[in-house]
Amino acid sequence: MDQPEIEAVFVDALQNVAESVTELVGFEVAAISVVRDDSHLEMVAVAGSDSARAELLGRRTPIAEIEQELRSAEHWGDLLRFVPHERMTTPADQLGWVPDLVPSDDPEMWHPLDLLLVPFHDDEGELRGLLSVDVPTDRRRPAPGVRSHLQRYAAHARRSLLTGLERAELAHRVRLADAARKIVRQVSSELSIERIVSICQPAVTTGFDAAGMWIQTFDLDRGGGDAVHGATEAEIVVAEEFKVMGRAAAELLWQAQEVALVTRDTFPEIDGLTVEEEQKARLWEFMATALEATSLLFVPIGAGQECVGNMALTRRGTKDEWSLAEREAALEIGHDLGHALKNAQTFERERRLLEEVRELASYKSRLIATISHELRTPLTAVLGHLELMESARLPVLVAGSMQAVQRGAQRMRRMVEDLLVLSQVADPSRVLDPYPVDLAQVVEDVLGLLDVTLTRQELTVVFDAPDEPVRVPGDVVGLDRMCTNLIGNAAKYTPKGGTITITLVPSGEMVELSITDTGVGISPEDQERLFEEFFRSSDPEVLDIPGTGLGLAIVHRIVEQHHGTIDVVSAPGEGSTFTVSLPAKARPV
Ligand code: ADP
């Protein structure tokens, strides 16, 4: 059953009770009203007289007024309260409906302004409803017999009313909890705070029958600059002093696991928070003018021990009461939102960090590229002149120095070339435009280019690949560079007469390329740092072999760019195997 259905059943039950009173107890009119919020009674059932029904149904009476009357009432048993017309304080024209009876001075007779009431209190002593009866059928003020008869019906009416109210309250809670759950379901996967707020807002404002909703998120990293999100209507500018107060209040309320209610002229007591009278006045003014609200439910938002924000829900005019169920549900939403916001904040922080790292990496690449370019031109000139001088007849001593200079310049050129390549493959702003590349063909080409070196080193090369092309989506220049560096290293670090075995196998969704050599091998400590820029083994045997320490760093970047992985298995003196795994299919963008 939904809320309106439950309400209809409840009102029907009360109408039945009222009708039984008119039919069986001896009164022409019986009416039942219910406490709708903390300050009013609403008439929901009227039986007996059509004119009374038309006049009274839906009528709202301040509880204070009824309580005032009850104070002067005669107690007839523990439930019935009789207010003879002469004691009544409410002016007759405010009673709503007065029976058309001729007043009599006889104290035994019922006076049209007499009131016979049965207030219904719950087990906690709270007033929850009221039964009033009028016009006894015998026109006499009820005698003890009639009173006890009425009393029995009244007890029955009280039970109906209290169970009905309980059911309605439960349904209300379910409705709110539903809205809350809906929010959690929808927002827990949302990673931007703005999205969380925009999704929650309609659900929460509907669920709570609120006029507006605002969420303040605390900037947990920087302490200040908290942001306020959302408003149902125009954007609201919230003064810094309210943000500071909101944060302090939310943190205290989160510790106490409570919500707080601000109305036009009341301010909640929050343990540990002192607010100046002028500040309260400014807040009330802000509520009345900017928010156009008569009440504001203030809810802390948090996760675990940490309070991450607060939510303000506003109401206007007659709807400004917040039931206990609503307050509890609002606090639950504070928990749900807390988790979602915390997720979003962590995500946002990581994203910012990643962006900074990328920015730094990009800057580094640009710097390396610029320096390498600047070095390349003079180096080319140096090497050109050295070549020219080779043909000149030079004294032996000078020729020896010249060769040393040439070796040094060539090393520098290799370094500059490698740095240029590294700056390109390490630049995060460079996006790969994948194209199917036959890796078998790439390996064949690289072997062709390295043929002289391989022959000079007397190395045996075994290349094992399927007959058909083995394609991977990628950049042919990068993949060529990757194979050159890996096969080049195998050749460089394998003594004469050794063997290099290359295998290329499609394996499920991946393609595996392995390069195994029978060379010097790599120690476990060195394996850990192998892919770092400028890393070279400290092994003196290896250090004699020229190198820049950039080759594997470049390979690593290229493999990453292709969404692949690289592994090494090696032992000193026993050779090494480098295995690259690349996806066989392009990833969806
Ligand atoms: P470079 O070869 O220019 O020094 P690399 O980045 O290609 O730079 O390699 C880094 C270090 O890793 C090398 O100095 C060498 O010590 C070690 N290394 C790389 N490949 C092999 C291999 N196949 N066998 C033995 N050691 C290797």
Image: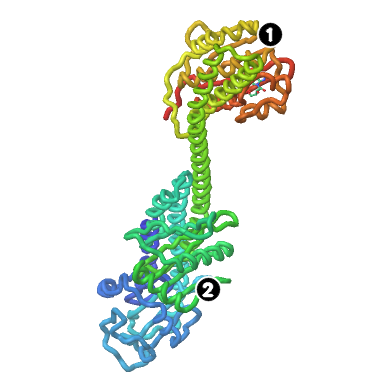
Foreground pick, 408 / 212: 408
SS assignment at label 1 = loop
Foreground pick, 572 / 175: 572
SS assignment at label 2 = loop
Residue 47 located left or right of residue 151: left
Q: Marks 2 and 1: in contact by CB < 8 Å?
A: no
Looking at the picture, how far across and down is residue 310, in whole percent? 48, 60
Q: Nearer the viewer, mark 1 or mark 2?
A: 1
Residue drawn at point x = 40 percent, y = 73 percent: 284
Location of residue 316 with respect to 86 vertically, above or below: above
Task: Write down the quadrant of residue 160 in the picture.
Answer: bottom left
- Give the Cα separation between the discs numbered 1 and 2: 87 Å
Residue 486 located left or right of residue 51: right
Residue drawn at point x = 55 percent, y = 26 percent: 554
The colour mode here is rainbow
User: Residue type at mark 1?
Assistant: Lys
Q: Is residue 379 visible?
A: yes
Which numbered disc covers residue 12?
Answer: none
Ligand number 1: quarter of image: top right
Residue drawn at point x = 49 percent, y = 66 percent: 244
Looking at the picture, how far across and down is residue 8, in whole percent? 36, 60
Residue under label 2, please give it.
269
Location of residue 373 with respect to 281 vertically, above or below: above
User: Residue type at mark 2?
Assistant: Glu
Say which quadrant the C terminus sits in.
Answer: top left
Which numbered disc covers residue 496?
Answer: 1
